Amino acid sequence: MDIPRQEQSLPVGRHRDLAAWWHARRASHTGVALGEVGDLYHHHYGLGTYDPSVLDGPPETRDDRIVDELHRLETAQAMALLDRLGDVTPEDRLLDAGSGRGGTSFLAHERFACRVDGVSVSDHQVDFSNNQARERGCRGKVCFHYRNMLDTGFPDGFYRAVWTNETTMYVDLPALFREFARLLPLGGRYVCVTGCANDALGRRSAAVSRIDRHYICGVHPRSDYFQALAASGLAPIEVVDLTDRAVPYWELRAQSPVRTGIEEAFLTAYGEGSFQYLLIAADRV
Ligand code: GPP
Ligand code: MG
């Protein structure tokens, strides 16, 4: 289908130094082992415990080993999201809403061998990830579009599943879930991984406000997710609090050469319970 480019209409975070760092490092360290996952670019956080030996050993390789370990945890996070997409066949079609530089989309295509579309309001990210698709030999199967996830322009019921990997804090949830409900057929699956404010504790904490300022985003309260899902006919089938599994990534990142200064806010917010890292899988009903 012919896919027109859309004008940028979402607020997006500033271009991040870390992304540039990853790019430069990956481009200039071609001899560095990238692990079994290949050359993937993530704009989300990691999950699981890290190998503490990366903090020891030869100082000249320590930074590279820490960075590779962070990257491994980020890939594990994307895998946990894909685990919840349900039964996806090669004939199905998936949507990555806020696709960044394509990391999760490529992992999805590798796992399910199906067509994957990604949408982003960063034309730089769209160009970057389409080039990646070309290099990876899957340009016809994994396609990135300069489109707004609130108004994708794709047909009704077009996707077997849709996901957002840490992108919902940039948009209005009721509008987003209305669009996803339109894109999914009955029984279609939506999977969300997100950081949210724990409104069971009342007011937003200073640490969560700091995260908002750092990323130029608006972290939503937990209850907003469930209200907006219900309002759009998206019924949760699984809700997982991943907070405990998110903490080690931040502990390692705080000691890494790619720390950005926001690590302490995440560790404080998770530690005091004011911020939670959630996975929500919901079906279109
Ligand atoms: C990546 O941040 C994550 C986001 C941009 C989403 C914001 C998520 C929240 C829960 C607030 P990063 O610091 O790892 O930077 P980069 O995008 O460069 O990897
Ligand atoms: Mg990152």
Image (cartoon, helix red, strand yellow):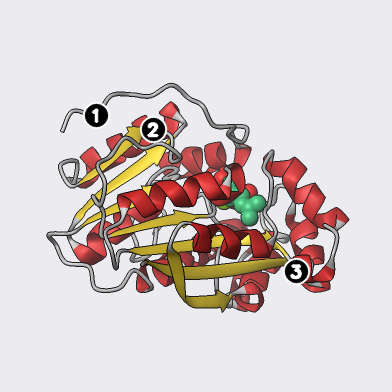
Q: CA distance from mark 1 to mark 2?
A: 9 Å
In three-dimensional space, the C-alpha distance between marks 3 and 1, rounded to whole angstroms, equals: 41 Å
As helix, strand or loop, the secondary structure at mark 2 comes to loop
Q: Nearer the viewer, mark 3 or mark 1?
A: 1
Q: Residue at x 43, y 64 (%)?
A: 234
Q: Which quadrant holds the C terminus?
A: bottom left
Pointer 1 and pointer 2: residues touching (CB < 8 Å)?
yes
Residue ID for mark 3: 270
Q: Position of residue 254 (x, y in %)?
A: 72, 60
| Residue 39 visible within the image | no
On the image, the x and y values in percent for residue 178 come to 44, 49
Residue 132 left/right relative to 12: left
Label 3 neighbour load within 10 Å: few <14, some 14-19, many 20+: many
Kindly identify which residue carries mark 1: 3
Ligand 1 within 8 A of label 2's CB?
Answer: no
Q: Which mark is residue 147?
A: 2
What amino acid is labelled 3 in the image?
A: Tyr
Horizontal side of residue 200 vs 154, given as left or right: right
Label 1 CA crowd tier, 10 Å (few <14, some 14–19, many 20+): few
Helix, strand or loop at label 1? It is loop
The amino acid type, in three-letter code, at marker 1 is: Ile
Disc with the residue nearer the chain's start (1 vs 2): 1
Number of on-image labels:
3
